[in-house]
Image (tube, helix red, strand yellow):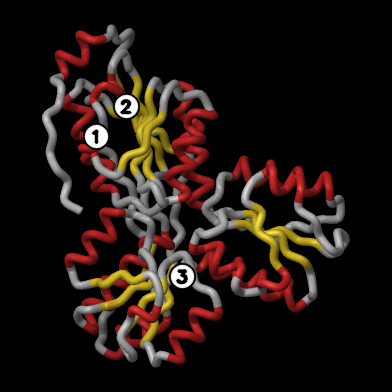
Amino acid sequence: MPQVPRARRTREDVEAAAVVSGEKKVMLAAPRGYCAGVDRAVIAVEKALEHHGAPVYVRKEIVHNRHVVDTLEQQGVVFVEELDEVPEGALTVFSAHGVSPAVVNEAAERNLQTIDATCPLVTKVHREAVRFAKQNRSILLIGHEGHEEVEGTYGEAPEHTTIINNPEEARTVEVEDPDNLIWLSQTTLSVDETLEIVSILRERFPNLQDPPSDDICYATSNRQAAIKKISPSCDLVIVVGSANSSNSVRLKEVAVEYGAQRAERVDFANQVDESWFEGVATVGLSSGASVPEVLVQEVLTLLAEYGYGSVEEVVTAEEDIIFSLPKELRAEMKKVGDNDRSLGGRRTNTAH
């Protein structure tokens, strides 16, 4: 999706429209951008192209980011909605969000060569769903119905699982056995909203059990914590991320909830409206967990053109998590002595 340039109002015009009180600056949230699971999934597709050549098919978007998807398409990746669009026997990658057992079975029936790029943290939730279903427990899955991750987790134990989309549904859901109940969640949800829903459920069902470990992804938690830290000081917060990225959309919402005067989400720097800068001294900047750092740097370049050249990176956590590439790829790489980029999660944020 090529970005179409447009005429911009000048810095002078914007500054003349409203007085800015105080020094212009950027508060750059960290951590931000690529998490280990996203890095692993993108590298997996790149490695599949390198070892097998184009086309490589990917069911759904490998990660929810327009730039990543467009870039991979240019390299020979074909994204499909369902497996019946893939030629029989072709190489197919499952996205970072995971798939249900029904999709895995369909792939086997079509003799597809598959690489499973599901984030290991999502796989953990899938395994929990299977285990609790075998124990004949009822599962309340907190998440957004229709999201690929929720579809995959629900598909592990549909007869045992009820999806809870929001606090309102938590207040009205009916269960057969309130004493044999456990909750799981989509990994990219808001920490606060998840806790609110769990609190409502526990008030109604006092014996509701927690999962053995927190399902919310470390990267989701860290990015939300960072944006909570900067938002009270910001006149404007810009979140870089795509509209179908749950964690990116939620970052924008969290910014306003925690004190930002205004928050906006963009895919690309040229979607930033310079009128947002009127009267603005401090701009906060972050990005969702599927966003390459280059897109953040392009926004920083634009901000500098409008006088926001002073950048303070606010670090609330250090991330050192790495994941091995999918086992199918590792086996192929080992055969040919390919030791390049065998792990996902080593890409780090770089301040401007």
Above-or-below relation of 339 to 263:
below
Q: Which residue is mark 1?
A: 300
- In 3D space, how far apart are the residues under numbered discs 2 and 1 (Cα atoms)? 8 Å
Above-or-below relation of 289 to 344:
above
- In 3D space, how far apart are the residues under numbered discs 1 and 3 (Cα atoms)? 31 Å
- In 3D space, how far apart are the residues under numbered discs 2 and 3 (Cα atoms)? 35 Å
Q: Earlier along the polypeptide chain: callout 2 or callout 3?
A: 2
Q: Which residue is mark 2?
A: 26
| Viewer-nearest residue: 35 or 126 | 126
Classify residue 127 as left or right of residue 225.
Answer: right
Whether label 2 touches label 3, CB < 8 Å: no
SS class of the residue under badge 1?
helix
Q: Earlier along the polypeptide chain: callout 2 or callout 1?
A: 2
Which quarter of the picture shows residue 193?
top right
What amino acid does circle 3 point to?
Thr
SS class of the residue under badge 2?
strand
Give the residue at x 47% y 65%: 97
* Mark 1, other Cα within 10 Å: few <14 / some 14–19 / many ≥20: many
Total label count?
A: 3
Classify residue 147 as left or right of residue 242.
Answer: right
Q: Which mark is residue 118?
A: 3
Whether label 2 touches label 1, CB < 8 Å: yes
